[in-house]
Amino acid sequence: MKPSLASSDSRPAPQPNKWAVFAVVAIGVLMATLDSSIVNISLPVIARSFQRPLSGVMQWVVMAYLLVIVALLLTGGRLGDMFGRKPVWQAGLGLFSLGSAACGLAPNIGALIGARALQGVGAALLMAMSPALLTAAFPASERGRALGMNALSVAIGVSAGPPLGGFITARLSWRWIFFINVPIGLVGLILAALLLPAPSGRQRSRFDWVGASLLAVSLASLTGALSFAYDLGWGSELIWGGLLTSMIGFSLFALHESRHTAPLIDPRLLKNRVFTLAWLSLVLSFLAAFGVAFLTPFYLQQLRGFSTEQAGWVMMAYPVAIAVCAPVAGRWSDQLGSRTLAPLGLFIVAGALVLLGQSGAATPLTRLTLNLALVGFGQALFQPANNSTLLGAAPVGAQGLAGGLLATGRVLGQSLSVAVTGAVFAALGGAEAGRLLALRRPALAEPALAQTFVASYRAALWVCAGIALLGALVSLSRGRLRPAAGHTPPDSRASGGAHVVAKLDQA
Protein backbone atom coordinates (compact mmCIF):
# COMPACT_ATOMS: atom_id res chain seq x y z
CA MET A 1 0.00 0.00 0.00
CA LYS A 2 1.46 3.32 -1.04
CA PRO A 3 1.74 6.01 1.63
CA SER A 4 -0.54 9.00 1.59
CA LEU A 5 1.01 12.21 0.38
CA ALA A 6 -1.09 14.34 2.66
CA SER A 7 1.10 16.26 5.05
CA SER A 8 0.59 19.07 7.48
CA ASP A 9 3.93 20.50 6.39
CA SER A 10 2.30 22.51 3.61
CA ARG A 11 -0.22 24.12 5.96
CA PRO A 12 1.91 25.52 8.78
CA ALA A 13 0.45 27.30 11.73
CA PRO A 14 0.62 30.13 12.39
CA GLN A 15 0.57 31.44 8.83
CA PRO A 16 3.97 33.06 8.07
CA ASN A 17 4.36 36.53 6.67
CA LYS A 18 4.18 35.91 2.94
CA TRP A 19 6.60 38.68 1.95
CA ALA A 20 9.11 37.61 4.58
CA VAL A 21 9.03 34.12 3.08
CA PHE A 22 9.42 35.59 -0.41
CA ALA A 23 12.43 37.67 0.68
CA VAL A 24 14.19 34.62 2.13
CA VAL A 25 13.37 32.48 -0.91
CA ALA A 26 14.60 35.25 -3.23
CA ILE A 27 18.04 35.10 -1.61
CA GLY A 28 18.40 31.43 -2.52
CA VAL A 29 16.95 31.86 -6.00
CA LEU A 30 19.23 34.79 -6.80
CA MET A 31 22.33 32.98 -5.58
CA ALA A 32 21.56 29.74 -7.44
CA THR A 33 20.68 31.41 -10.75
CA LEU A 34 23.50 33.95 -10.50
CA ASP A 35 26.06 31.19 -10.25
CA SER A 36 24.71 29.53 -13.37
CA SER A 37 25.93 32.52 -15.42
CA ILE A 38 28.49 34.47 -13.37
CA VAL A 39 31.29 31.96 -14.01
CA ASN A 40 31.16 32.04 -17.82
CA ILE A 41 32.61 35.55 -18.15
CA SER A 42 35.52 34.63 -15.84
CA LEU A 43 36.44 31.31 -17.46
CA PRO A 44 39.35 32.74 -19.50
CA VAL A 45 40.89 34.22 -16.34
CA ILE A 46 40.34 30.98 -14.40
CA ALA A 47 41.94 29.01 -17.23
CA ARG A 48 45.01 31.24 -17.16
CA SER A 49 45.19 30.97 -13.38
CA PHE A 50 45.40 27.17 -13.56
CA GLN A 51 47.41 27.22 -16.81
CA ARG A 52 44.75 25.29 -18.68
CA PRO A 53 43.30 25.71 -22.20
CA LEU A 54 39.86 27.26 -22.30
CA SER A 55 38.31 24.15 -23.89
CA GLY A 56 38.15 20.59 -22.59
CA VAL A 57 38.26 20.24 -18.82
CA MET A 58 37.44 23.94 -18.26
CA GLN A 59 33.92 23.38 -19.62
CA TRP A 60 33.26 21.20 -16.59
CA VAL A 61 33.57 24.20 -14.31
CA VAL A 62 30.20 25.19 -15.79
CA MET A 63 28.75 21.77 -16.62
CA ALA A 64 29.46 20.14 -13.23
CA TYR A 65 27.20 22.71 -11.59
CA LEU A 66 24.39 22.39 -14.13
CA LEU A 67 24.41 18.59 -14.41
CA VAL A 68 24.31 18.06 -10.65
CA ILE A 69 21.36 20.44 -10.41
CA VAL A 70 19.29 18.65 -13.05
CA ALA A 71 20.25 15.26 -11.59
CA LEU A 72 19.05 16.12 -8.06
CA LEU A 73 16.05 18.44 -8.53
CA LEU A 74 13.43 15.68 -8.22
CA THR A 75 15.27 14.07 -5.32
CA GLY A 76 15.34 17.42 -3.55
CA GLY A 77 11.63 17.91 -4.11
CA ARG A 78 10.81 14.48 -2.69
CA LEU A 79 13.03 15.07 0.36
CA GLY A 80 11.18 18.33 0.99
CA ASP A 81 7.83 16.56 0.96
CA MET A 82 9.14 13.93 3.37
CA PHE A 83 11.16 15.97 5.85
CA GLY A 84 9.80 19.47 5.49
CA ARG A 85 10.63 22.32 3.13
CA LYS A 86 12.38 24.54 5.66
CA PRO A 87 15.13 22.08 6.71
CA VAL A 88 15.74 21.00 3.12
CA TRP A 89 15.94 24.62 1.97
CA GLN A 90 18.34 25.43 4.82
CA ALA A 91 20.46 22.40 3.93
CA GLY A 92 20.55 23.60 0.33
CA LEU A 93 21.70 27.11 1.27
CA GLY A 94 24.28 25.71 3.69
CA LEU A 95 25.74 23.34 1.07
CA PHE A 96 25.71 26.08 -1.55
CA SER A 97 27.60 28.46 0.76
CA LEU A 98 30.09 25.74 1.73
CA GLY A 99 30.62 24.87 -1.94
CA SER A 100 31.15 28.56 -2.74
CA ALA A 101 33.87 28.84 -0.09
CA ALA A 102 35.51 25.68 -1.45
CA CYS A 103 35.42 27.12 -4.99
CA GLY A 104 37.16 30.29 -3.86
CA LEU A 105 39.85 28.28 -2.07
CA ALA A 106 40.31 25.67 -4.80
CA PRO A 107 44.06 24.94 -5.29
CA ASN A 108 43.61 23.25 -8.68
CA ILE A 109 41.07 22.69 -11.45
CA GLY A 110 39.95 19.31 -10.09
CA ALA A 111 39.13 20.81 -6.70
CA LEU A 112 37.23 23.66 -8.37
CA ILE A 113 35.10 21.24 -10.39
CA GLY A 114 34.35 19.17 -7.28
CA ALA A 115 33.39 22.30 -5.34
CA ARG A 116 31.13 23.40 -8.20
CA ALA A 117 29.39 20.03 -7.97
CA LEU A 118 28.83 20.66 -4.25
CA GLN A 119 27.37 24.04 -5.13
CA GLY A 120 25.08 22.22 -7.54
CA VAL A 121 23.76 19.95 -4.77
CA GLY A 122 22.81 23.00 -2.73
CA ALA A 123 21.34 24.83 -5.72
CA ALA A 124 19.16 21.81 -6.59
CA LEU A 125 17.64 21.79 -3.10
CA LEU A 126 17.05 25.56 -3.25
CA MET A 127 15.41 25.46 -6.69
CA ALA A 128 13.22 22.50 -5.81
CA MET A 129 11.96 24.05 -2.55
CA SER A 130 11.43 27.65 -3.67
CA PRO A 131 8.15 27.22 -5.63
CA ALA A 132 6.65 25.02 -2.89
CA LEU A 133 7.58 27.52 -0.15
CA LEU A 134 5.95 30.36 -2.09
CA THR A 135 2.86 28.30 -2.92
CA ALA A 136 2.34 27.52 0.77
CA ALA A 137 2.97 31.09 1.95
CA PHE A 138 0.69 32.96 -0.48
CA PRO A 139 -3.09 32.58 -0.72
CA ALA A 140 -4.47 31.07 -3.89
CA SER A 141 -5.68 34.45 -5.12
CA GLU A 142 -2.10 35.83 -5.06
CA ARG A 143 -0.14 32.78 -6.17
CA GLY A 144 0.41 34.02 -9.71
CA ARG A 145 1.77 37.28 -8.35
CA ALA A 146 4.20 35.40 -6.08
CA LEU A 147 5.44 33.19 -8.89
CA GLY A 148 5.76 36.25 -11.13
CA MET A 149 7.98 37.88 -8.52
CA ASN A 150 9.96 34.64 -8.35
CA ALA A 151 10.44 34.84 -12.12
CA LEU A 152 11.76 38.36 -11.53
CA SER A 153 14.36 36.93 -9.13
CA VAL A 154 15.39 34.32 -11.71
CA ALA A 155 15.69 36.93 -14.48
CA ILE A 156 17.79 39.23 -12.29
CA GLY A 157 20.08 36.36 -11.30
CA VAL A 158 20.62 35.19 -14.87
CA SER A 159 21.07 38.65 -16.41
CA ALA A 160 23.25 40.09 -13.63
CA GLY A 161 25.72 37.18 -13.73
CA PRO A 162 27.95 38.23 -16.67
CA PRO A 163 28.32 41.96 -15.83
CA LEU A 164 28.77 41.29 -12.10
CA GLY A 165 31.26 38.50 -12.75
CA GLY A 166 33.27 40.74 -15.07
CA PHE A 167 33.25 43.60 -12.56
CA ILE A 168 34.41 41.46 -9.63
CA THR A 169 37.05 39.59 -11.64
CA ALA A 170 38.52 42.81 -13.05
CA ARG A 171 38.76 44.60 -9.69
CA LEU A 172 39.43 41.79 -7.22
CA SER A 173 39.96 38.20 -8.35
CA TRP A 174 37.91 35.43 -9.95
CA ARG A 175 37.88 33.76 -6.51
CA TRP A 176 35.66 36.54 -5.18
CA ILE A 177 32.81 35.64 -7.52
CA PHE A 178 32.48 32.64 -5.18
CA PHE A 179 33.54 34.21 -1.86
CA ILE A 180 30.80 36.83 -2.17
CA ASN A 181 28.21 34.06 -1.74
CA VAL A 182 29.43 33.11 1.74
CA PRO A 183 28.30 36.15 3.78
CA ILE A 184 25.07 36.35 1.78
CA GLY A 185 24.43 32.67 2.49
CA LEU A 186 25.05 33.15 6.21
CA VAL A 187 22.56 36.02 6.30
CA GLY A 188 20.08 33.86 4.39
CA LEU A 189 20.47 31.01 6.89
CA ILE A 190 19.82 33.34 9.83
CA LEU A 191 16.74 34.83 8.15
CA ALA A 192 15.48 31.37 7.21
CA ALA A 193 15.72 30.22 10.82
CA LEU A 194 13.73 33.26 11.94
CA LEU A 195 11.20 33.70 9.15
CA LEU A 196 10.47 30.42 7.37
CA PRO A 197 7.63 28.36 8.88
CA ALA A 198 8.75 25.24 10.71
CA PRO A 199 7.40 21.92 9.38
CA SER A 200 4.60 20.62 11.59
CA GLY A 201 4.69 17.04 10.35
CA ARG A 202 6.56 14.52 8.24
CA GLN A 203 5.41 11.88 5.84
CA ARG A 204 5.92 8.35 7.05
CA SER A 205 7.65 6.94 4.02
CA ARG A 206 10.95 5.35 3.05
CA PHE A 207 13.09 7.31 0.67
CA ASP A 208 13.74 5.50 -2.61
CA TRP A 209 17.53 5.79 -2.86
CA VAL A 210 17.81 3.32 -5.72
CA GLY A 211 15.19 5.16 -7.78
CA ALA A 212 16.80 8.51 -6.97
CA SER A 213 20.20 7.23 -8.11
CA LEU A 214 18.83 5.81 -11.36
CA LEU A 215 16.95 9.01 -12.11
CA ALA A 216 19.98 11.20 -11.31
CA VAL A 217 22.25 9.23 -13.66
CA SER A 218 19.60 9.22 -16.40
CA LEU A 219 18.87 12.94 -16.25
CA ALA A 220 22.54 13.92 -16.01
CA SER A 221 23.44 11.67 -18.96
CA LEU A 222 20.61 13.00 -21.12
CA THR A 223 21.24 16.65 -20.29
CA GLY A 224 25.00 16.30 -20.74
CA ALA A 225 24.63 14.61 -24.11
CA LEU A 226 22.19 17.23 -25.37
CA SER A 227 24.34 20.11 -24.09
CA PHE A 228 27.56 18.88 -25.71
CA ALA A 229 25.97 17.66 -28.97
CA TYR A 230 26.51 21.02 -30.70
CA ASP A 231 30.21 21.18 -29.81
CA LEU A 232 31.12 17.50 -30.26
CA GLY A 233 28.71 16.63 -33.07
CA TRP A 234 26.00 14.01 -33.16
CA GLY A 235 28.47 11.40 -34.42
CA SER A 236 30.51 11.58 -31.22
CA GLU A 237 30.79 8.35 -29.22
CA LEU A 238 30.45 10.38 -26.02
CA ILE A 239 27.12 11.82 -27.15
CA TRP A 240 25.70 8.45 -28.15
CA GLY A 241 27.07 6.88 -24.98
CA GLY A 242 25.30 9.49 -22.90
CA LEU A 243 22.02 9.00 -24.76
CA LEU A 244 22.26 5.20 -24.44
CA THR A 245 23.03 5.50 -20.72
CA SER A 246 20.00 7.75 -20.21
CA MET A 247 17.70 5.36 -22.12
CA ILE A 248 18.83 2.37 -20.08
CA GLY A 249 18.65 4.38 -16.87
CA PHE A 250 15.11 5.63 -17.52
CA SER A 251 13.97 2.10 -18.38
CA LEU A 252 15.41 0.68 -15.16
CA PHE A 253 13.94 3.59 -13.21
CA ALA A 254 10.44 2.98 -14.59
CA LEU A 255 10.72 -0.75 -13.80
CA HIS A 256 11.97 -0.06 -10.29
CA GLU A 257 9.32 2.57 -9.55
CA SER A 258 6.50 0.25 -10.63
CA ARG A 259 7.56 -2.21 -7.92
CA HIS A 260 8.44 0.18 -5.11
CA THR A 261 6.00 0.80 -2.26
CA ALA A 262 7.06 4.47 -1.95
CA PRO A 263 8.01 5.59 -5.48
CA LEU A 264 10.08 8.72 -5.96
CA ILE A 265 7.50 10.21 -8.34
CA ASP A 266 3.91 10.06 -7.16
CA PRO A 267 1.93 8.26 -9.92
CA ARG A 268 -1.02 10.57 -9.26
CA LEU A 269 0.96 13.43 -10.77
CA LEU A 270 1.56 11.53 -13.99
CA LYS A 271 -2.11 10.57 -14.24
CA ASN A 272 -3.25 14.16 -13.71
CA ARG A 273 -4.01 15.59 -17.16
CA VAL A 274 -3.74 19.20 -16.02
CA PHE A 275 -0.38 18.68 -14.33
CA THR A 276 1.09 16.59 -17.15
CA LEU A 277 0.09 18.96 -19.95
CA ALA A 278 1.13 22.02 -17.94
CA TRP A 279 4.55 20.40 -17.45
CA LEU A 280 4.79 19.49 -21.14
CA SER A 281 3.93 23.03 -22.22
CA LEU A 282 6.60 24.28 -19.79
CA VAL A 283 9.25 22.10 -21.46
CA LEU A 284 8.10 23.25 -24.90
CA SER A 285 8.23 26.91 -23.85
CA PHE A 286 11.89 26.69 -22.83
CA LEU A 287 12.71 24.51 -25.84
CA ALA A 288 11.34 27.31 -28.02
CA ALA A 289 12.61 30.41 -26.24
CA PHE A 290 16.07 29.31 -25.14
CA GLY A 291 17.13 29.04 -28.76
CA VAL A 292 17.17 32.85 -28.75
CA ALA A 293 19.65 32.99 -25.88
CA PHE A 294 21.79 30.30 -27.53
CA LEU A 295 21.93 31.41 -31.18
CA THR A 296 21.50 35.18 -31.11
CA PRO A 297 24.95 35.88 -29.58
CA PHE A 298 26.45 34.09 -32.62
CA TYR A 299 24.32 36.27 -34.88
CA LEU A 300 25.45 39.45 -33.12
CA GLN A 301 29.16 38.62 -32.94
CA GLN A 302 29.83 36.57 -36.07
CA LEU A 303 27.44 38.17 -38.54
CA ARG A 304 27.10 41.71 -37.18
CA GLY A 305 30.63 42.03 -35.78
CA PHE A 306 29.59 43.13 -32.29
CA SER A 307 32.03 42.75 -29.41
CA THR A 308 31.20 40.36 -26.59
CA GLU A 309 30.28 43.30 -24.36
CA GLN A 310 28.07 44.91 -27.01
CA ALA A 311 26.31 41.62 -27.70
CA GLY A 312 25.73 41.18 -23.98
CA TRP A 313 24.00 44.53 -23.69
CA VAL A 314 21.72 43.79 -26.66
CA MET A 315 20.83 40.36 -25.21
CA MET A 316 19.79 42.05 -21.95
CA ALA A 317 16.53 43.04 -23.66
CA TYR A 318 15.26 39.46 -23.23
CA PRO A 319 15.73 38.96 -19.44
CA VAL A 320 14.92 42.60 -18.67
CA ALA A 321 11.55 42.20 -20.39
CA ILE A 322 10.87 39.14 -18.24
CA ALA A 323 11.98 40.95 -15.08
CA VAL A 324 9.74 43.94 -15.78
CA CYS A 325 6.67 42.08 -17.02
CA ALA A 326 6.58 38.88 -14.94
CA PRO A 327 5.30 40.45 -11.67
CA VAL A 328 2.54 42.28 -13.56
CA ALA A 329 1.69 39.13 -15.52
CA GLY A 330 1.46 37.23 -12.25
CA ARG A 331 -1.20 39.64 -10.99
CA TRP A 332 -3.06 39.33 -14.30
CA SER A 333 -2.97 35.56 -13.90
CA ASP A 334 -4.62 35.86 -10.48
CA GLN A 335 -7.32 38.12 -11.91
CA LEU A 336 -7.95 36.55 -15.33
CA GLY A 337 -6.98 32.92 -14.77
CA SER A 338 -3.97 31.10 -16.14
CA ARG A 339 -5.87 29.35 -18.91
CA THR A 340 -6.01 32.62 -20.83
CA LEU A 341 -2.55 34.02 -20.21
CA ALA A 342 -0.46 30.85 -20.52
CA PRO A 343 -1.36 30.01 -24.15
CA LEU A 344 -1.48 33.71 -25.06
CA GLY A 345 2.10 34.05 -23.86
CA LEU A 346 3.30 31.21 -26.07
CA PHE A 347 1.40 32.55 -29.08
CA ILE A 348 3.28 35.83 -28.56
CA VAL A 349 6.58 33.94 -28.26
CA ALA A 350 5.85 32.14 -31.55
CA GLY A 351 5.11 35.41 -33.33
CA ALA A 352 8.17 37.11 -31.85
CA LEU A 353 10.42 34.25 -32.98
CA VAL A 354 9.10 34.57 -36.53
CA LEU A 355 9.88 38.31 -36.46
CA LEU A 356 13.31 37.75 -34.94
CA GLY A 357 14.06 35.12 -37.57
CA GLN A 358 13.67 37.77 -40.26
CA SER A 359 16.76 39.60 -38.97
CA GLY A 360 19.53 40.08 -41.51
CA ALA A 361 23.00 41.58 -41.66
CA ALA A 362 21.65 45.13 -41.65
CA THR A 363 18.54 44.88 -39.45
CA PRO A 364 18.17 48.05 -37.32
CA LEU A 365 19.30 47.50 -33.75
CA THR A 366 16.07 49.00 -32.39
CA ARG A 367 13.96 46.46 -34.25
CA LEU A 368 16.19 43.61 -33.11
CA THR A 369 16.01 44.72 -29.48
CA LEU A 370 12.23 45.07 -29.59
CA ASN A 371 11.86 41.56 -31.00
CA LEU A 372 14.07 40.15 -28.24
CA ALA A 373 11.99 42.00 -25.66
CA LEU A 374 8.80 40.63 -27.24
CA VAL A 375 10.06 37.07 -26.76
CA GLY A 376 10.72 37.92 -23.11
CA PHE A 377 7.27 39.47 -22.75
CA GLY A 378 5.61 36.32 -24.06
CA GLN A 379 7.61 34.18 -21.64
CA ALA A 380 6.68 36.56 -18.81
CA LEU A 381 2.98 36.05 -19.58
CA PHE A 382 3.34 32.28 -19.79
CA GLN A 383 5.59 31.36 -16.87
CA PRO A 384 3.74 32.68 -13.76
CA ALA A 385 0.37 31.52 -15.07
CA ASN A 386 1.56 28.07 -16.13
CA ASN A 387 3.70 27.53 -13.02
CA SER A 388 0.78 28.44 -10.83
CA THR A 389 -1.36 25.83 -12.57
CA LEU A 390 1.32 23.15 -12.37
CA LEU A 391 1.82 23.62 -8.64
CA GLY A 392 -1.90 23.96 -8.01
CA ALA A 393 -2.60 20.65 -9.73
CA ALA A 394 -0.25 18.77 -7.38
CA PRO A 395 -1.60 17.16 -4.19
CA VAL A 396 -0.87 19.02 -0.96
CA GLY A 397 1.90 16.62 0.08
CA ALA A 398 3.62 16.64 -3.30
CA GLN A 399 4.34 20.35 -3.68
CA GLY A 400 8.08 19.82 -3.25
CA LEU A 401 8.13 17.13 -5.91
CA ALA A 402 6.07 19.37 -8.20
CA GLY A 403 8.60 22.16 -7.70
CA GLY A 404 11.39 19.75 -8.57
CA LEU A 405 9.58 18.66 -11.73
CA LEU A 406 9.03 22.30 -12.66
CA ALA A 407 12.74 23.12 -12.40
CA THR A 408 13.70 19.87 -14.15
CA GLY A 409 11.39 20.72 -17.04
CA ARG A 410 13.04 24.11 -17.38
CA VAL A 411 16.57 22.67 -17.56
CA LEU A 412 15.47 19.85 -19.86
CA GLY A 413 13.79 22.31 -22.22
CA GLN A 414 16.91 24.48 -22.33
CA SER A 415 19.15 21.46 -23.06
CA LEU A 416 16.82 20.24 -25.81
CA SER A 417 16.79 23.74 -27.28
CA VAL A 418 20.58 23.82 -27.55
CA ALA A 419 20.52 20.40 -29.24
CA VAL A 420 17.66 21.15 -31.67
CA THR A 421 18.57 24.69 -32.69
CA GLY A 422 22.27 23.81 -32.86
CA ALA A 423 21.53 20.83 -35.11
CA VAL A 424 19.33 22.86 -37.49
CA PHE A 425 21.77 25.76 -37.59
CA ALA A 426 24.80 23.54 -38.26
CA ALA A 427 23.03 21.26 -40.76
CA LEU A 428 22.18 24.24 -42.98
CA GLY A 429 25.73 25.58 -42.89
CA GLY A 430 25.24 28.38 -40.39
CA ALA A 431 27.94 27.23 -37.96
CA GLU A 432 30.65 27.05 -40.62
CA ALA A 433 29.51 30.30 -42.25
CA GLY A 434 29.65 32.03 -38.89
CA ARG A 435 33.17 30.76 -38.24
CA LEU A 436 34.36 32.08 -41.59
CA LEU A 437 32.54 35.39 -41.19
CA ALA A 438 34.27 35.93 -37.86
CA LEU A 439 37.59 35.68 -39.70
CA ARG A 440 36.59 37.85 -42.66
CA ARG A 441 35.23 41.20 -41.61
CA PRO A 442 33.03 42.94 -42.60
CA ALA A 443 30.16 40.52 -43.13
CA LEU A 444 28.71 42.58 -45.97
CA ALA A 445 31.87 41.86 -48.00
CA GLU A 446 30.97 38.16 -47.93
CA PRO A 447 27.35 38.13 -49.17
CA ALA A 448 27.26 34.37 -49.84
CA LEU A 449 28.43 33.51 -46.32
CA ALA A 450 26.11 36.10 -44.79
CA GLN A 451 23.17 34.71 -46.76
CA THR A 452 23.92 31.16 -45.57
CA PHE A 453 24.18 32.34 -41.98
CA VAL A 454 20.94 34.31 -42.12
CA ALA A 455 19.04 31.43 -43.74
CA SER A 456 20.28 28.99 -41.10
CA TYR A 457 19.49 31.38 -38.23
CA ARG A 458 16.02 31.99 -39.65
CA ALA A 459 15.27 28.28 -40.06
CA ALA A 460 16.36 27.50 -36.50
CA LEU A 461 14.23 30.27 -35.00
CA TRP A 462 11.23 29.36 -37.12
CA VAL A 463 11.51 25.78 -35.89
CA CYS A 464 11.44 27.25 -32.39
CA ALA A 465 8.37 29.28 -33.36
CA GLY A 466 6.61 26.06 -34.39
CA ILE A 467 7.53 24.51 -31.05
CA ALA A 468 6.13 27.54 -29.21
CA LEU A 469 2.91 27.23 -31.22
CA LEU A 470 2.69 23.55 -30.26
CA GLY A 471 3.22 24.52 -26.62
CA ALA A 472 0.37 27.02 -26.82
CA LEU A 473 -1.96 24.35 -28.23
CA VAL A 474 -0.92 21.92 -25.48
CA SER A 475 -1.62 24.61 -22.90
CA LEU A 476 -5.06 25.22 -24.38
CA SER A 477 -5.91 21.52 -24.26
CA ARG A 478 -5.00 20.79 -20.66
CA GLY A 479 -8.50 21.26 -19.26
CA ARG A 480 -9.71 22.53 -15.92
CA LEU A 481 -8.15 21.82 -12.57
CA ARG A 482 -10.14 19.77 -10.09
CA PRO A 483 -9.12 20.82 -6.59
CA ALA A 484 -7.67 18.06 -4.43
CA ALA A 485 -9.04 17.42 -0.98
CA GLY A 486 -7.93 20.16 1.38
CA HIS A 487 -6.39 22.12 -1.47
CA THR A 488 -7.62 25.49 -2.68
CA PRO A 489 -7.39 25.80 -6.44
CA PRO A 490 -4.57 28.17 -7.38
CA ASP A 491 -6.55 29.86 -10.10
CA SER A 492 -9.42 30.67 -7.78
CA ARG A 493 -10.35 34.29 -8.07
CA ALA A 494 -11.39 36.58 -5.28
CA SER A 495 -14.65 38.36 -5.94
CA GLY A 496 -16.02 40.30 -3.02
CA GLY A 497 -13.99 38.05 -0.74
CA ALA A 498 -15.49 34.85 -2.14
CA HIS A 499 -13.36 32.38 -4.10
CA VAL A 500 -14.77 30.99 -7.30
CA VAL A 501 -13.62 27.37 -7.39
CA ALA A 502 -13.49 27.03 -11.12
CA LYS A 503 -9.87 27.19 -11.88
CA LEU A 504 -7.41 26.26 -14.56
CA ASP A 505 -3.95 24.80 -14.45
CA GLN A 506 -0.91 26.73 -13.60
CA ALA A 507 2.45 26.06 -14.95
Image (spheres, rainbow, N blue to C red):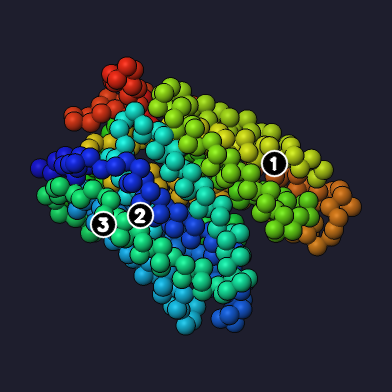
Quadrant of image for the N terminus = top left
Mark 1 and mark 2: span between their CA atoms?
A: 32 Å
Q: How many marks?
A: 3
**Residue under the point 44% across and 38% down:** 148
**Residue under the point 52% across and 26% down:** 344
The spot of residue 113 in percent (x, y) is 45, 72
On residue 126, which mark appears? 2
Q: Earlier in the sequence, mark 3 or mark 1?
A: 3
Q: Earlier in the sequence, mark 3 or mark 2?
A: 2
The spot of residue 80 in percent (x, y) is 25, 51
**Residue under the point 66% across and 54% down:** 312
Marks 3 & 1, CB-CB < 8 Å contact = no
What amino acid is found at the position of numbered circle 1 in the picture? Thr
Q: Depth check: 374 or 414 in front?
A: 374
Image vertical order of residue 420 relative to residue 309, above or below: above
Question: Mark 3 sits on what residue?
Answer: 193
What SS does tag 3 mark?
helix
Quadrant of image for the C terminus = top left
